[in-house]
Image: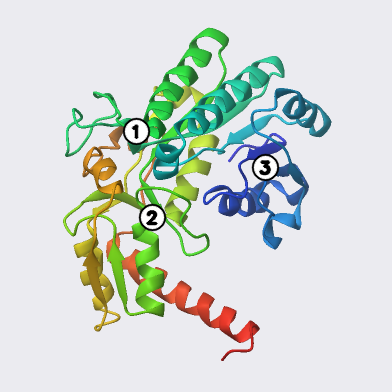
Amino acid sequence: MQTIQQKILVIGATGQIGSELVPKLREIYGNENVIAMGHKTAPPPHLLTGPFLFADATDKQILHEIIQQHQINVIYHLAALLSATGEQNPDLAWQINLNGLKTVLDLAVENKIERVFWPSSIAVFGPETPKENVPNETVMRPKTMYGITKAVGELLCEYYYQKYNLDVRSLRYPGIISYETLPGGGTTDWAVAIFYDAIKNGNYISFVSSDTTLPMMYMPDCLKATIDLMQADKNKLKHRCFNLAAMSFSPAEVTLEIKKHLPGFECNYAPDYRQVIANSWPKSINDTAAREEWGWSPDYDLSKMVADMLQQISAKLLVTVDSDGRN
């Protein structure tokens, strides 16, 4: 754990990861020391336990003023347009994902920011990448605009580290599964939606085929990895960007696990345009570098994650029904 005082800015705080990362950071560093920033989406109440600001992540002047006013020395830059949404609006994906990143990196250099976190993704990989046990250094020829922006972003972060000695750190996230936030336009959204439909309807129609195996991770492990990497000793890090793994599964495999708890559950399949995206990604990831350089180890496997997801969503839906007076 670092002992120096940190003043943290989380850009993209209302997204899937940001909305859960902010409370964790506030537990560690204090509510007033973690400034959450969003663009358009009204923040959920739990983000209002500390400062919350509305700003455009690509507006350099506004970001500069925020950094100066709040004496920011650490930035988590999470704002991005995800894979499926990015294919529908590639120009916007480039603007948010890359121009926004460069704006933050430039400001970090100008303001002598201590360190920056920026999320990459398994979307940097493409059909030419090995399908199994993908190493940290490998072929990256993504076929989506989202993947392209992440691959270029990795190179940009490496450039700023080499040229300006900016301590920027990154994780190639797999599909992230959470009971707190709903899917946000990614190709792995099915791995969250399947749980809600299992509980509410007893069935789910998957937009990828039954045997589409992809790397996945439960949100508690995602948050743990993100914070652990940012707290790691800089002198022990040989990489700027790390593969990150926890489990890999297909819709058929998670269906079998759900049926252990909900025997009547059924999953049907109607693959759409997202199937092509999923087919370009690997099935499993080698994260040896993360394990060796900063001690990464996941806490959740498939069975433990499924059990917790079903329990948490069931409780969440019951609370919602009761509060509406429809119980």
Mark 3, secondary structure of its residue: loop
Q: Nearer the viewer, residue 155 or 295?
A: 155
Marks 1 and 3 sit apart, C-alpha to C-alpha, by 24 Å
What residue lies at 63% left-to-right and 38% top-to-bottom?
Answer: 11
Disc 2 residue type (three-letter): Asp
Q: Is residue 274 above or below residue 170?
A: below
- Return the x and y of residue 37 as percentages of the image width and height: 69, 42
Mark 2, secondary structure of its residue: loop
Return the mark for residue 39.
Answer: 3
Q: Nearer the viewer, residue 97 or 28?
A: 97
| Label 3 CA crowd tier, 10 Å (few <14, some 14–19, many 20+) | some
Mark 1, secondary structure of its residue: loop
Quadrant of the snapshot with the N terminus: top right
Return the mark for residue 279.
Answer: none
- Return the x and y of residue 122 as percentages of the image width and height: 33, 37
Q: Which residue is mark 2?
A: 189
Outermost right residue: 69
| Label 2 CA crowd tier, 10 Å (few <14, some 14–19, many 20+) | some
Marks 2 and 1 sit apart, C-alpha to C-alpha, by 16 Å
Q: Earlier in the sequence, mark 2 or mark 1?
A: 1
| Label 1 CA crowd tier, 10 Å (few <14, some 14–19, many 20+) | many
Q: Which residue is mark 1?
A: 144
Q: Earlier in the sequence, mark 1 or mark 3?
A: 3
Q: Nearer the viewer, residue 138 or 153?
A: 153
Asked if residue 255 lies left or right of residue 235, the reply is left
Disc 3 residue type (three-letter): His
